[in-house]
Image (tube, grey):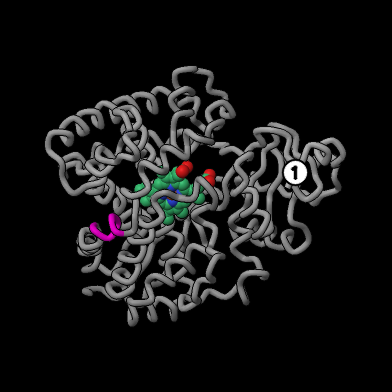
Protein backbone atom coordinates (compact mmCIF):
# COMPACT_ATOMS: atom_id res chain seq x y z
CA UNK A 1 0.00 0.00 0.00
CA UNK A 2 2.87 2.42 0.49
CA UNK A 3 6.54 2.73 -0.20
CA UNK A 4 9.11 5.40 0.46
CA UNK A 5 9.01 6.94 -3.02
CA UNK A 6 5.20 7.23 -3.08
CA UNK A 7 5.34 8.94 0.35
CA UNK A 8 7.48 11.64 -1.22
CA UNK A 9 5.35 12.10 -4.32
CA UNK A 10 1.77 11.47 -3.16
CA UNK A 11 -0.29 14.61 -2.53
CA UNK A 12 -1.36 15.20 1.07
CA UNK A 13 -4.93 14.18 1.89
CA UNK A 14 -5.26 17.61 3.52
CA UNK A 15 -4.85 19.26 0.09
CA UNK A 16 -7.22 16.93 -1.75
CA UNK A 17 -10.60 18.12 -2.92
CA UNK A 18 -12.86 16.01 -0.72
CA UNK A 19 -16.48 16.21 0.38
CA UNK A 20 -16.95 17.51 3.90
CA UNK A 21 -18.97 15.97 6.71
CA UNK A 22 -19.55 17.10 10.26
CA UNK A 23 -20.01 13.82 12.12
CA UNK A 24 -19.37 15.63 15.40
CA UNK A 25 -22.53 17.65 15.64
CA UNK A 26 -24.24 16.35 18.81
CA UNK A 27 -27.55 17.93 17.79
CA UNK A 28 -27.84 15.96 14.56
CA UNK A 29 -30.46 13.21 14.60
CA UNK A 30 -28.95 9.76 14.12
CA UNK A 31 -31.12 8.95 11.13
CA UNK A 32 -30.35 12.25 9.42
CA UNK A 33 -26.59 11.89 10.00
CA UNK A 34 -26.61 8.26 8.95
CA UNK A 35 -28.35 9.16 5.72
CA UNK A 36 -25.82 11.92 5.04
CA UNK A 37 -22.89 9.56 5.66
CA UNK A 38 -24.38 6.96 3.35
CA UNK A 39 -25.13 9.49 0.60
CA UNK A 40 -21.53 10.65 0.76
CA UNK A 41 -20.29 7.05 0.61
CA UNK A 42 -21.97 6.71 -2.78
CA UNK A 43 -19.83 9.63 -3.99
CA UNK A 44 -16.50 9.15 -2.28
CA UNK A 45 -14.60 6.60 -0.18
CA UNK A 46 -13.36 9.40 2.08
CA UNK A 47 -14.62 12.70 3.45
CA UNK A 48 -13.04 15.53 5.39
CA UNK A 49 -14.36 16.07 8.94
CA UNK A 50 -13.50 18.71 11.59
CA UNK A 51 -10.78 16.52 13.16
CA UNK A 52 -9.44 14.56 10.22
CA UNK A 53 -11.08 12.21 7.76
CA UNK A 54 -14.02 9.81 7.72
CA UNK A 55 -13.38 6.55 5.86
CA UNK A 56 -16.60 5.45 4.19
CA UNK A 57 -16.15 2.53 1.79
CA UNK A 58 -16.45 -1.04 3.13
CA UNK A 59 -13.13 -2.18 1.64
CA UNK A 60 -11.40 1.01 2.77
CA UNK A 61 -12.72 0.74 6.33
CA UNK A 62 -11.45 -2.86 6.39
CA UNK A 63 -8.09 -1.91 4.87
CA UNK A 64 -7.44 0.88 7.38
CA UNK A 65 -8.46 -1.27 10.37
CA UNK A 66 -6.19 -4.08 9.15
CA UNK A 67 -3.19 -1.85 8.53
CA UNK A 68 -1.06 -1.94 11.67
CA UNK A 69 0.47 1.47 10.98
CA UNK A 70 -2.86 3.02 11.95
CA UNK A 71 -2.94 2.98 15.76
CA UNK A 72 -5.99 3.03 17.99
CA UNK A 73 -7.06 6.55 18.90
CA UNK A 74 -8.39 5.30 22.23
CA UNK A 75 -4.80 5.54 23.53
CA UNK A 76 -4.88 9.27 22.88
CA UNK A 77 -8.38 9.91 24.15
CA UNK A 78 -7.30 11.17 27.57
CA UNK A 79 -4.78 13.60 26.08
CA UNK A 80 -7.27 14.76 23.46
CA UNK A 81 -9.76 15.51 26.23
CA UNK A 82 -7.12 17.70 27.91
CA UNK A 83 -6.12 15.33 30.73
CA UNK A 84 -2.49 15.87 31.65
CA UNK A 85 -2.19 13.71 34.78
CA UNK A 86 0.72 11.43 33.74
CA UNK A 87 -0.27 8.55 36.05
CA UNK A 88 -3.73 8.48 34.50
CA UNK A 89 -2.43 8.60 30.95
CA UNK A 90 0.19 5.92 31.63
CA UNK A 91 -2.44 3.57 33.06
CA UNK A 92 -4.68 3.91 30.02
CA UNK A 93 -1.84 3.33 27.58
CA UNK A 94 -1.37 -0.16 28.92
CA UNK A 95 -4.86 -1.32 27.95
CA UNK A 96 -5.34 -4.01 25.29
CA UNK A 97 -7.62 -1.51 23.51
CA UNK A 98 -4.73 0.86 22.94
CA UNK A 99 -1.72 -1.49 22.89
CA UNK A 100 -0.14 -1.98 19.47
CA UNK A 101 2.55 -4.10 17.84
CA UNK A 102 4.12 -7.01 19.72
CA UNK A 103 2.66 -5.94 23.07
CA UNK A 104 -0.82 -6.29 21.61
CA UNK A 105 -0.07 -9.55 19.75
CA UNK A 106 1.19 -11.13 22.97
CA UNK A 107 -1.87 -10.05 24.97
CA UNK A 108 -4.31 -11.32 22.32
CA UNK A 109 -2.46 -14.62 22.05
CA UNK A 110 -2.65 -15.15 25.79
CA UNK A 111 -6.31 -14.25 26.25
CA UNK A 112 -7.88 -15.51 22.99
CA UNK A 113 -8.96 -18.90 24.33
CA UNK A 114 -10.67 -17.44 27.39
CA UNK A 115 -12.93 -15.43 25.04
CA UNK A 116 -13.81 -18.32 22.72
CA UNK A 117 -17.41 -19.07 21.63
CA UNK A 118 -17.32 -22.11 23.93
CA UNK A 119 -16.53 -19.97 26.97
CA UNK A 120 -19.42 -17.66 26.04
CA UNK A 121 -21.77 -20.64 25.61
CA UNK A 122 -21.19 -21.64 29.24
CA UNK A 123 -23.12 -18.54 30.24
CA UNK A 124 -26.17 -18.93 27.99
CA UNK A 125 -28.46 -20.51 30.61
CA UNK A 126 -27.50 -17.77 33.05
CA UNK A 127 -28.20 -15.09 30.42
CA UNK A 128 -31.72 -16.46 29.94
CA UNK A 129 -32.23 -16.50 33.69
CA UNK A 130 -31.20 -12.83 33.97
CA UNK A 131 -33.41 -11.68 31.07
CA UNK A 132 -36.38 -13.66 32.39
CA UNK A 133 -35.88 -12.10 35.82
CA UNK A 134 -35.91 -8.61 34.32
CA UNK A 135 -39.00 -9.28 32.18
CA UNK A 136 -40.82 -10.78 35.18
CA UNK A 137 -40.73 -7.33 36.77
CA UNK A 138 -42.53 -5.61 33.90
CA UNK A 139 -44.60 -8.39 32.27
CA UNK A 140 -47.69 -8.00 34.49
CA UNK A 141 -48.13 -4.31 33.61
CA UNK A 142 -47.38 -4.58 29.89
CA UNK A 143 -45.32 -1.38 30.11
CA UNK A 144 -41.58 -0.83 30.37
CA UNK A 145 -38.76 1.54 29.61
CA UNK A 146 -36.67 -1.06 27.77
CA UNK A 147 -33.50 1.05 28.01
CA UNK A 148 -33.75 1.47 31.78
CA UNK A 149 -35.55 -1.70 32.89
CA UNK A 150 -33.91 -4.29 30.64
CA UNK A 151 -30.83 -2.99 28.77
CA UNK A 152 -29.22 -1.02 31.59
CA UNK A 153 -29.09 -3.84 34.17
CA UNK A 154 -28.58 -6.79 31.77
CA UNK A 155 -24.77 -6.89 31.23
CA UNK A 156 -23.64 -6.42 34.83
CA UNK A 157 -24.66 -9.83 36.25
CA UNK A 158 -23.24 -11.45 33.11
CA UNK A 159 -19.86 -9.75 33.51
CA UNK A 160 -19.83 -10.61 37.24
CA UNK A 161 -20.68 -14.24 36.51
CA UNK A 162 -18.05 -14.27 33.76
CA UNK A 163 -15.42 -13.03 36.19
CA UNK A 164 -16.69 -15.09 39.10
CA UNK A 165 -17.68 -12.11 41.28
CA UNK A 166 -20.48 -12.85 43.75
CA UNK A 167 -24.05 -11.58 43.37
CA UNK A 168 -23.83 -9.28 46.37
CA UNK A 169 -21.20 -7.26 44.46
CA UNK A 170 -23.36 -6.56 41.36
CA UNK A 171 -24.23 -3.06 42.58
CA UNK A 172 -20.57 -2.24 43.19
CA UNK A 173 -19.67 -3.35 39.67
CA UNK A 174 -22.51 -1.38 38.22
CA UNK A 175 -21.25 1.81 39.87
CA UNK A 176 -17.60 1.20 38.91
CA UNK A 177 -18.57 0.45 35.32
CA UNK A 178 -20.63 3.64 35.13
CA UNK A 179 -17.89 5.79 36.66
CA UNK A 180 -15.01 4.28 34.69
CA UNK A 181 -16.99 4.75 31.47
CA UNK A 182 -17.23 8.51 32.17
CA UNK A 183 -13.85 8.74 30.42
CA UNK A 184 -15.83 8.74 27.16
CA UNK A 185 -17.96 11.75 28.16
CA UNK A 186 -17.28 15.29 27.03
CA UNK A 187 -17.36 16.30 30.73
CA UNK A 188 -14.44 14.04 31.63
CA UNK A 189 -12.28 16.84 33.09
CA UNK A 190 -14.89 17.66 35.75
CA UNK A 191 -15.30 13.99 36.59
CA UNK A 192 -11.67 12.94 36.71
CA UNK A 193 -11.63 12.42 40.49
CA UNK A 194 -14.71 10.18 40.34
CA UNK A 195 -13.18 8.18 37.47
CA UNK A 196 -9.85 7.76 39.26
CA UNK A 197 -11.51 6.72 42.52
CA UNK A 198 -13.69 4.12 40.75
CA UNK A 199 -10.66 2.86 38.83
CA UNK A 200 -8.65 2.41 42.01
CA UNK A 201 -11.47 0.68 43.89
CA UNK A 202 -12.08 -1.64 40.96
CA UNK A 203 -8.37 -2.45 40.64
CA UNK A 204 -8.12 -3.19 44.35
CA UNK A 205 -11.17 -5.43 44.22
CA UNK A 206 -9.80 -7.25 41.16
CA UNK A 207 -6.44 -7.88 42.84
CA UNK A 208 -8.28 -9.52 45.76
CA UNK A 209 -10.40 -11.60 43.39
CA UNK A 210 -7.27 -12.73 41.54
CA UNK A 211 -5.61 -13.75 44.81
CA UNK A 212 -8.70 -15.76 45.78
CA UNK A 213 -8.90 -17.48 42.37
CA UNK A 214 -5.22 -18.42 42.37
CA UNK A 215 -5.95 -20.59 45.43
CA UNK A 216 -9.42 -21.66 44.39
CA UNK A 217 -9.73 -22.10 40.59
CA UNK A 218 -13.27 -22.26 39.16
CA UNK A 219 -15.04 -22.37 35.79
CA UNK A 220 -14.80 -18.67 35.02
CA UNK A 221 -12.96 -16.17 32.86
CA UNK A 222 -10.62 -15.03 35.61
CA UNK A 223 -9.48 -18.59 36.29
CA UNK A 224 -8.94 -19.07 32.53
CA UNK A 225 -6.97 -15.83 32.30
CA UNK A 226 -4.81 -16.75 35.32
CA UNK A 227 -4.12 -20.16 33.77
CA UNK A 228 -3.56 -18.79 30.25
CA UNK A 229 -0.08 -19.69 29.19
CA UNK A 230 1.77 -19.74 25.90
CA UNK A 231 5.27 -21.09 25.71
CA UNK A 232 5.93 -20.39 29.37
CA UNK A 233 4.54 -16.86 29.12
CA UNK A 234 1.73 -15.70 31.42
CA UNK A 235 -0.16 -12.53 32.31
CA UNK A 236 1.13 -10.92 35.50
CA UNK A 237 -1.25 -9.53 38.14
CA UNK A 238 -1.31 -6.00 36.73
CA UNK A 239 -2.03 -7.34 33.25
CA UNK A 240 -4.88 -9.40 34.68
CA UNK A 241 -6.24 -6.28 36.36
CA UNK A 242 -6.02 -4.45 33.02
CA UNK A 243 -7.92 -7.27 31.28
CA UNK A 244 -10.72 -7.12 33.84
CA UNK A 245 -10.90 -3.37 33.26
CA UNK A 246 -11.03 -3.90 29.51
CA UNK A 247 -13.88 -6.38 29.93
CA UNK A 248 -15.85 -3.86 31.98
CA UNK A 249 -15.09 -0.91 29.70
CA UNK A 250 -15.64 -2.95 26.52
CA UNK A 251 -18.42 -5.23 27.64
CA UNK A 252 -21.09 -3.31 29.54
CA UNK A 253 -22.21 -0.16 27.77
CA UNK A 254 -21.72 -1.72 24.33
CA UNK A 255 -24.00 -4.67 25.02
CA UNK A 256 -26.73 -2.65 26.73
CA UNK A 257 -26.82 -0.05 23.97
CA UNK A 258 -26.75 -2.65 21.20
CA UNK A 259 -29.70 -4.38 22.81
CA UNK A 260 -31.49 -1.01 23.05
CA UNK A 261 -30.74 -0.25 19.38
CA UNK A 262 -32.08 -3.69 18.49
CA UNK A 263 -35.37 -3.35 20.34
CA UNK A 264 -35.79 0.25 19.09
CA UNK A 265 -35.34 -1.02 15.56
CA UNK A 266 -37.79 -3.88 16.04
CA UNK A 267 -40.47 -1.42 17.20
CA UNK A 268 -40.36 -0.07 13.64
CA UNK A 269 -40.58 -3.59 12.18
CA UNK A 270 -43.35 -5.44 14.07
CA UNK A 271 -43.47 -8.22 11.46
CA UNK A 272 -39.81 -9.04 12.16
CA UNK A 273 -40.44 -8.99 15.93
CA UNK A 274 -43.21 -11.53 15.50
CA UNK A 275 -41.06 -13.62 13.19
CA UNK A 276 -38.32 -13.77 15.83
CA UNK A 277 -40.86 -14.75 18.50
CA UNK A 278 -42.18 -17.54 16.27
CA UNK A 279 -38.76 -18.69 15.06
CA UNK A 280 -36.19 -18.15 17.84
CA UNK A 281 -33.70 -20.21 15.82
CA UNK A 282 -33.29 -17.07 13.68
CA UNK A 283 -31.48 -15.38 16.58
CA UNK A 284 -27.96 -15.65 15.05
CA UNK A 285 -28.89 -14.05 11.71
CA UNK A 286 -31.17 -11.56 13.49
CA UNK A 287 -28.27 -10.36 15.65
CA UNK A 288 -25.94 -9.87 12.66
CA UNK A 289 -28.69 -7.98 10.81
CA UNK A 290 -29.52 -5.77 13.79
CA UNK A 291 -25.84 -4.91 14.24
CA UNK A 292 -25.48 -4.17 10.55
CA UNK A 293 -28.61 -2.05 10.35
CA UNK A 294 -28.27 -0.11 13.62
CA UNK A 295 -24.95 -0.60 15.39
CA UNK A 296 -24.24 0.81 18.85
CA UNK A 297 -20.67 1.52 17.74
CA UNK A 298 -20.91 3.80 14.73
CA UNK A 299 -17.21 3.76 13.99
CA UNK A 300 -13.83 3.95 15.59
CA UNK A 301 -10.74 6.18 15.49
CA UNK A 302 -7.18 5.70 14.33
CA UNK A 303 -4.10 7.90 14.00
CA UNK A 304 -1.20 7.48 11.59
CA UNK A 305 1.83 6.23 13.57
CA UNK A 306 4.01 7.21 10.57
CA UNK A 307 3.48 8.80 7.16
CA UNK A 308 1.05 6.52 5.33
CA UNK A 309 0.16 6.52 1.64
CA UNK A 310 -3.19 4.95 0.83
CA UNK A 311 -5.03 5.21 -2.48
CA UNK A 312 -2.41 7.69 -3.68
CA UNK A 313 -2.98 10.10 -0.83
CA UNK A 314 -0.43 10.91 1.85
CA UNK A 315 -1.69 10.84 5.43
CA UNK A 316 1.09 12.51 7.41
CA UNK A 317 2.11 11.02 10.76
CA UNK A 318 -0.47 11.97 13.42
CA UNK A 319 -3.40 12.25 10.97
CA UNK A 320 -6.65 11.12 12.58
CA UNK A 321 -9.17 9.04 10.65
CA UNK A 322 -12.56 7.59 11.59
CA UNK A 323 -13.41 4.37 9.78
CA UNK A 324 -17.22 4.46 9.64
CA UNK A 325 -19.07 1.24 10.45
CA UNK A 326 -22.36 3.03 9.76
CA UNK A 327 -21.31 3.65 6.20
CA UNK A 328 -19.58 0.30 5.60
CA UNK A 329 -22.58 -1.59 6.94
CA UNK A 330 -24.79 -0.22 4.17
CA UNK A 331 -22.37 -0.76 1.34
CA UNK A 332 -24.36 -1.76 -1.77
CA UNK A 333 -21.17 -3.48 -3.01
CA UNK A 334 -21.58 -5.97 -0.18
CA UNK A 335 -25.30 -6.22 0.64
CA UNK A 336 -28.18 -6.50 -1.73
CA UNK A 337 -30.79 -3.93 -0.89
CA UNK A 338 -28.92 -2.72 2.24
CA UNK A 339 -31.81 -0.46 3.30
CA UNK A 340 -34.07 -3.45 3.95
CA UNK A 341 -34.10 -4.85 7.49
CA UNK A 342 -34.41 -8.62 7.15
CA UNK A 343 -33.54 -10.93 10.04
CA UNK A 344 -33.34 -13.94 7.73
CA UNK A 345 -30.49 -12.33 5.73
CA UNK A 346 -27.57 -14.75 5.60
CA UNK A 347 -24.17 -13.23 6.47
CA UNK A 348 -21.80 -13.05 3.52
CA UNK A 349 -18.70 -15.23 4.04
CA UNK A 350 -15.59 -13.09 4.55
CA UNK A 351 -17.62 -9.85 4.57
CA UNK A 352 -19.03 -9.46 8.08
CA UNK A 353 -20.99 -6.53 9.42
CA UNK A 354 -18.49 -4.02 10.79
CA UNK A 355 -19.96 -3.09 14.18
CA UNK A 356 -17.42 -5.34 15.94
CA UNK A 357 -14.58 -3.64 14.03
CA UNK A 358 -11.88 -5.46 12.08
CA UNK A 359 -8.16 -6.19 12.20
CA UNK A 360 -6.10 -6.68 15.34
CA UNK A 361 -8.49 -4.81 17.64
CA UNK A 362 -11.55 -6.75 16.42
CA UNK A 363 -13.88 -7.05 19.40
CA UNK A 364 -12.45 -9.57 21.85
CA UNK A 365 -15.86 -10.05 23.43
CA UNK A 366 -17.72 -10.65 20.15
CA UNK A 367 -18.68 -14.24 21.05
CA UNK A 368 -19.96 -13.16 24.43
CA UNK A 369 -21.85 -10.16 23.00
CA UNK A 370 -23.41 -12.32 20.29
CA UNK A 371 -24.50 -14.88 22.89
CA UNK A 372 -25.99 -12.13 25.09
CA UNK A 373 -28.00 -10.69 22.21
CA UNK A 374 -28.95 -14.07 20.77
CA UNK A 375 -30.37 -15.13 24.13
CA UNK A 376 -32.07 -11.85 25.01
CA UNK A 377 -33.81 -10.92 21.76
CA UNK A 378 -35.97 -14.02 21.05
CA UNK A 379 -36.91 -14.15 24.71
CA UNK A 380 -38.03 -10.53 24.69
CA UNK A 381 -39.88 -11.07 21.40
CA UNK A 382 -41.79 -14.03 22.88
CA UNK A 383 -42.60 -12.34 26.18
CA UNK A 384 -43.43 -8.92 24.76
CA UNK A 385 -45.89 -9.52 21.91
CA UNK A 386 -47.36 -6.54 20.08
CA UNK A 387 -44.53 -4.33 21.22
CA UNK A 388 -45.13 -0.63 20.45
CA UNK A 389 -43.38 2.59 21.39
CA UNK A 390 -45.32 4.46 24.05
CA UNK A 391 -44.67 8.08 23.11
CA UNK A 392 -41.21 8.48 21.59
CA UNK A 393 -37.76 6.92 21.81
CA UNK A 394 -35.21 9.31 23.34
CA UNK A 395 -31.88 8.62 21.63
CA UNK A 396 -28.50 9.54 23.15
CA UNK A 397 -26.59 12.22 21.24
CA UNK A 398 -25.27 10.68 18.06
CA UNK A 399 -21.75 11.69 19.06
CA UNK A 400 -21.83 9.45 22.16
CA UNK A 401 -19.04 6.91 21.75
CA UNK A 402 -21.52 4.10 22.30
CA UNK A 403 -24.88 4.98 20.84
CA UNK A 404 -28.35 3.79 21.80
CA UNK A 405 -31.63 4.84 23.38
CA UNK A 406 -31.57 6.71 26.71
CA UNK A 407 -35.28 5.94 27.08
CA UNK A 408 -37.36 3.44 25.17
CA UNK A 409 -40.88 3.45 26.61
CA UNK A 410 -43.02 0.62 25.28
CA UNK A 411 -46.32 -1.15 25.73
CA UNK A 412 -46.93 -4.83 24.96
CA UNK A 413 -49.45 -7.57 25.70
CA UNK A 414 -49.08 -8.25 29.44
CA UNK A 415 -48.79 -11.56 31.22
CA UNK A 416 -46.39 -13.52 28.99
C1 LIG B 1 -22.65 -5.60 21.07
C2 LIG B 1 -21.68 -5.38 21.91
C3 LIG B 1 -20.30 -4.96 21.50
C4 LIG B 1 -19.89 -4.16 20.47
C5 LIG B 1 -20.77 -3.45 19.44
C6 LIG B 1 -18.45 -4.07 20.54
C7 LIG B 1 -17.66 -3.38 19.63
C8 LIG B 1 -16.28 -3.36 19.66
C9 LIG B 1 -15.46 -2.73 18.67
C10 LIG B 1 -15.96 -1.95 17.45
C11 LIG B 1 -14.17 -2.93 19.03
C12 LIG B 1 -12.94 -2.45 18.26
C13 LIG B 1 -12.62 -1.03 18.61
C14 LIG B 1 -11.54 -0.45 17.73
O1 LIG B 1 -11.09 -1.08 16.77
O2 LIG B 1 -11.15 0.68 17.99
C15 LIG B 1 -14.16 -3.69 20.25
C16 LIG B 1 -13.03 -4.07 20.93
C17 LIG B 1 -13.05 -4.71 22.15
N1 LIG B 1 -14.17 -5.22 22.79
FE1 LIG B 1 -16.08 -5.14 22.13
N2 LIG B 1 -18.02 -4.79 21.61
C18 LIG B 1 -19.10 -5.37 22.22
C19 LIG B 1 -19.10 -6.19 23.32
C20 LIG B 1 -17.98 -6.55 24.04
C21 LIG B 1 -17.97 -7.43 25.20
C22 LIG B 1 -19.19 -8.13 25.77
C23 LIG B 1 -16.68 -7.45 25.66
C24 LIG B 1 -16.06 -8.17 26.82
C25 LIG B 1 -16.41 -9.21 27.39
C26 LIG B 1 -15.88 -6.63 24.78
C27 LIG B 1 -14.54 -6.43 24.92
C28 LIG B 1 -13.75 -5.79 23.98
C29 LIG B 1 -12.31 -5.65 24.12
C30 LIG B 1 -11.45 -6.13 25.29
C31 LIG B 1 -11.87 -4.97 22.97
C32 LIG B 1 -10.45 -4.58 22.63
C33 LIG B 1 -9.81 -5.62 21.77
C34 LIG B 1 -8.43 -5.24 21.31
O3 LIG B 1 -8.11 -4.05 21.28
O4 LIG B 1 -7.67 -6.15 20.97
N3 LIG B 1 -16.70 -6.11 23.80
N4 LIG B 1 -15.46 -3.96 20.61
Q: Which residues are magenta?
A: 118-122
Residue 250 at x, y percent in the picture: 41, 44
Which of the two residues, 141 or 332, is positioned nearer the viewer here?
A: 332
> Magenta segment, principal secondary structure?
helix
Query: Is residue 20 visible in this depiction of the protein?
Result: yes
For residue 299, above or below residue 6: below
Image quadrant assignment for residue 235: top left
The 10 Å Cα crowd at callout 1, few under 14, some 14 to 19, many 20 or more, is some
Residue 156 at x, y percent in the picture: 28, 47
- Residue name at image x 48 percent, y 62 percent: 291
For residue 286, above or below residue 72: below
Q: Which residue is the extreme one toward the front?
A: 231
Left or right: 318, with 97 as reference point: right
Q: Secondary structure at mark 1?
A: loop
- Residue name at image x 49 percent, y 72 percent: 268
Residue 79 on the magenta span:
no
| Circle 1 residue | 2
Residue 85 at x, y percent in the picture: 49, 17
Image quadrant assignment for residue 36: bottom right
Left or right: 376, with 416 as reference point: right
Residue 177 at x, y percent in the picture: 34, 39
For residue 264, above or below residue 236: below
Query: Is residue 252 visible in this depiction of the protein?
Result: no
Amino acid sequence: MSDDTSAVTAPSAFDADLPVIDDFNPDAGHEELTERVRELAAESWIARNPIGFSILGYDDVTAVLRDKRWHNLVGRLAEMRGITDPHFIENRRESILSAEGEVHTRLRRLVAKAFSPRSADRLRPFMREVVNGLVDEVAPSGRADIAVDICEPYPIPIICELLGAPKEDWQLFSRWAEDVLRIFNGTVLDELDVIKAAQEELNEYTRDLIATRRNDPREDLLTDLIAAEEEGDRLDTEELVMMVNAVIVGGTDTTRNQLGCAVGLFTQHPDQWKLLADRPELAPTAVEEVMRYLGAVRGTGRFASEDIVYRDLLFPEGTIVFPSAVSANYSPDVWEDPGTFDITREPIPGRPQMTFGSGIHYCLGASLARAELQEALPLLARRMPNLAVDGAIEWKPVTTAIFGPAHLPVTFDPGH
